[in-house]
Image (cartoon, coloured by chain):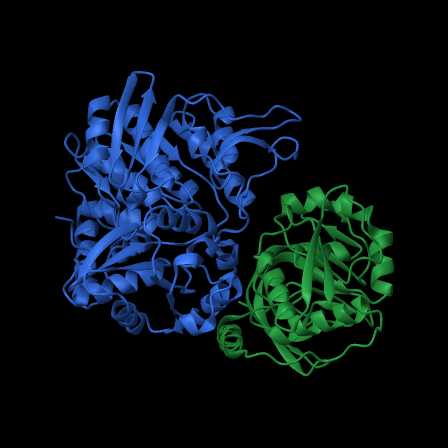
Amino acid sequence: MRIRVGHLYPDYLNIYADRGNIAVLAERARARGHELEVRAIGMGDGVPAGEIDLFYVGGGQDREQALVAHDLTAKTEALREAVEADVAFLAVCGGYQLLGRFYRDVSGQDQPGVGLLPLETIAGERRMIGDVLLECGWAGQTLAGFENHAGRTLLDAGAEPLGRVVAGFGNDGSSREEGCRYRRCYGTYLHGPLLPRNPWFADRLLAEALAHADGAGEVSKLAPLEDTLEREAHAVSAARARARGGR
Amino acid sequence: MRPPFPLALEAAAVRAAGALSRFAGRGGGTTLPGKLLWKLDPGAIDRLAGRLRDGSVLVSATNGKTTTTAMVAEILRPFVRVAHNSSGANLVSGIASTLLHSTGADLGLFEVDEAALPEVARRVHPKALLLGNLFRDQLDRYGELELVAARWRDAVAELPGALLVLNGDDPQVGDLARLHGKALIFGVDDPRRARPALQHAADSKYCLRCGTPYDYAAAYVGHLGDYRCPNCGHARPPLEIAAREIELHGLDGASFRLDTPGGSVGIDLALPGLYNVYNAVGAAALALALATPLAEVKAGLERFSAAFGRFERIGVGDRRVLMLLIKNPAGANEAVRTLVEGAPPKVALVALNDAIADGRDVSWIWDVDFEPLLPCLDRLVATGSRAAELALRFAYAGLPRERIDVVPSLEAALDRGLELTPAGGELTVLPTYTAMLALRRVVASRGHVKDYWEPAA
């Protein structure tokens, strides 16, 4: 089956190896006999509603993020419809912040967000940088990664985080929560090679995208792959977080 | 405040500490004396620098600062006694150590870490600054590119009397000339050597003034090139010192014509790759700014062979090791391009560590275009503290997993790589910074190369 990925602003938001996450999705889809078709959705482009099974938006430096923030608000309605129609969505770092209601920078200026996720972000003085380990009770799995953000993200009461912080800073350095999930939309600060070392999460996104692609809406489990290297990379990354995350 | 001890006494004491550190096998002792001095008396560094008869010059850049500084040192060597931090210890402490060990030097020539530039500049009051480029690098350590650029702007603003030698091909660096009356602009000008498109990891793609994507008449290395904003017209400044008519000879070197206001001269470099042409033209510009005759600039550049660990060939028994340091996407892309245009390796050892000096965040390997290596690569030895992560990078690029050996121990990996290399052959090694130091130590312990704190012969 063809899985249609809409990659938002690949020219602007690509600082933390977002290309790696896409490569992992493509290869793991191919290994199951599916094909990933990636379309770039850039500045001024319309969102092809109904034609996308998985949206991806990555992180950028502040400068690039500010350049796209206003353009993204013009895409709000199409993206909201997609999320409500159970299209899969992964938003990383800056992209995660943009899915909230706003991002308030150090000078107190607000950058508008699209408000797809029930959260807001306020820049802090000290950047939160380091390895992270999350426990995702809802999936019975862990996520290992790296975070580097000045924004403190506050979830609304009742909003679901992506995971509980075992080691690292997470959304704001104090709530012990990281990321946010709503329907099949996931936001997280864990950037860079998040999917290579957390293959279960890549497979979950693929399965959810497939459910949208085949129109059935039911999420079925994908055939397992030989993930020895992935497990090893996950173990090293998790050990790093335990040893030095959150400081 | 009066320092607690006379400078000479302090200097002698901390030099002894460095010797002790080497004796105890704790590394090169290249920064320890400086750290001690810094603790004892921070102002001592200013006074040591103040004793240099001809003052100091600084070199900073994300990529190429060690090589560029070493090139300048080679050009100046016949005329000036230079205090030079040649082992790459480029924080305040490393520069303090160099000053301590350079009694009798007339000119300070220091490569400086991008983030440490303001502090070092404040202490040594340089008469000239060579600023090469700004690429995304170790975001966990330096923060975002814009932050480093802002620090540079502040540092430059505090040095109204210093001459700036700037790479005009980098929008952020070239723009510093606007803040400063005295600037000399260098760059590369040979559209035949341009890349067909901006690379994936290109950084300063958007106009500094108005945010519109730049049009590139030629993009050479990352975002370095001949840019112009189609909206507001912000463009590369005219080049006063330029490399033109560039010929790249694979791994064997490069040649170009160096155009200067005082005439032109052909240069044959022993170092390969367009990035080394950038290093050479920058070094030439700084040397010329220090009133070095053009013929001596040429002679110095042509004498120059390699800077520590950046591009080195080391004999190991009946095989050779070719070592090219990789530390960020832009630099690694150039190493890959140089290999592919020279002799693409069949066996490669790639070493990824995640110590502070390497960057704790290893995401950057996914921004490197390793793919051009794949068609010729039979075997990859992935090593270092993040060996599995690196193996995944190549696996997802399409290298079959059975052709990847994951050997986290650097020493064992080197042995494995040499074993896979036929007798008389060359093993290509691409290490991150601390992996490079460790691999060199392994080779040194087997008697093949001098330890890095020993002066070069």
Q: Is residue B292 left or right of residue B218?
A: left
Q: Is residue B394 above or below residue B408?
A: above
Q: Which chain wears green? A: A
Residue extending farthest to the bottom is: A140
Pinpoint residue A233: horizontal percent, then vertical percent. Answer: 50, 73
Q: Is residue B416 left or right of residue B121?
A: left
Location of residue B427 (image quadrant): bottom left
Counting labels gives 0
Pinpoint residue B393: horizontal percent, then vertical percent. Answer: 49, 64
Q: Is residue B132 above or below residue B186?
A: below
Q: Is residue A211 left or right of residue B20?
A: right
Is residue B323 visible in the rendered image? The answer is yes
Which residue is rendered at x = 20% and y = 55% of the image? B453
Residue extending farthest to the top is: B262
Q: Is residue B389 left or right of residue B379?
A: right
Q: Nearer the viewer, residue B432 or B201?
A: B201
Which residue is rendered at x = 14% and y = 38% of the image? B104
Q: Is residue B190 above or below residue A190?
A: above
Q: Nearer the viewer, residue A23 or B281?
A: A23
Q: Is residue A30 above or below residue B214?
A: below
Pinpoint residue B68: horizontal percent, then vertical percent. Answer: 31, 39
Image quarter (top left, top right, bottom left or bottom right) of the N terminus of chain B: top left
Which residue is rendered at x = 21% and y = 30% of the image? B53
Visual hue assigned to chain B = blue
Which residue is rendered at x = 64% and y = 63% of the image? A189
